[in-house]
Image (tube, rainbow, N blue to C red):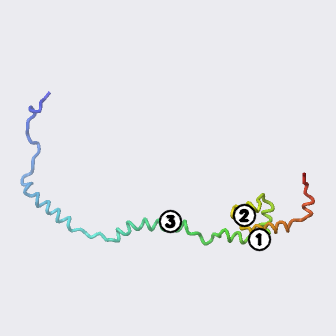
Amino acid sequence: MKRLEDIPKNNPFSVPDGYFEKLPGVIQARIEAGKIRKPVPYVRYALQYAMPVVALIIVAVIYLVPKSGENNYDDILSSVSTEQLAAYLADSDLTTDEIVDAGALDEESAEAIEAEVFNNIDLNDINELDLEL
């Protein structure tokens, strides 16, 4: 095995003639060339940072603003007549107490619907029912 002392000590690299004399001039020329830059317009930075924000706002407006063609639930419910509501409630298993507890109607509206249902009941239909006691 070779020892470190046995390896010859010579410089394998060579420097071109006059390199170090020309080096400061080359560096200075590169610095001067780099100083003359075109100014970056501020519009580019404004667009770069503002465009994502504008895009998010547009997406939020599209999804969060209600469409003009869509009706409000109150408008739809107000278009249904009292008789139709009474018929629906008579056919369903819902009680007026359950509807009031759910917060869908206030007490006065529930009582009005209940009165309408009881006023529209035909006594002949009740007599025909088979009631088991």
Tell me the residue at 72%/72% (across/down). Answer: 79
Give x and y (percent) for residue 46.
37, 69
In three-dimensional space, the C-alpha distance between marks 3 and 2, rounded to whole angstroms, equals 38 Å
Q: From the image, tell me which residue sits under label 1.
A: 81
Q: From the image, tell me which residue sits under label 3.
A: 59
| Mark 1 residue crowding within 10 angstroms, few (<14) / some (14–19) / many (20+) | few
Q: Amino acid at mark 3?
A: Val
Whether pointer 3 and pointer 2 mark residues with C-beta atoms closer than 8 Å, the reply is no
In three-dimensional space, the C-alpha distance between marks 1 and 3, rounded to whole angstroms, equals 39 Å
Whether pointer 2 and pointer 1 mark residues with C-beta atoms closer than 8 Å, the reply is no
Q: Amino acid at mark 2?
A: Val
Q: From the image, tell me which residue sits under label 2.
A: 100
In the image, residue 68 above or below residue 96? below
Give x and y (percent) for residue 104.
70, 65
Seen from the viewer's position, the closer of residues 57 and 19 is: 57
| Mark 3 residue crowding within 10 angstroms, few (<14) / some (14–19) / many (20+) | few
In the image, residue 83 above or below residue 16? below
Whether pointer 1 and pointer 3 mark residues with C-beta atoms closer than 8 Å, the reply is no
Give x and y (percent) for residue 62.
53, 67
Residue 120: which disc? none
Tell me the residue at 69%/64% (across/down). Answer: 103
Give x and y (percent) for residue 6.
9, 31
Does residue 66 appear left or right of residue 55 in this picture? right
Quadrant location of the N terminus in the rendered image: top left
Q: Quadrant of residue 36?
A: bottom left
Q: Amino acid at mark 1?
A: Ser
Seen from the viewer's position, the closer of residues 96 and 124 is: 96
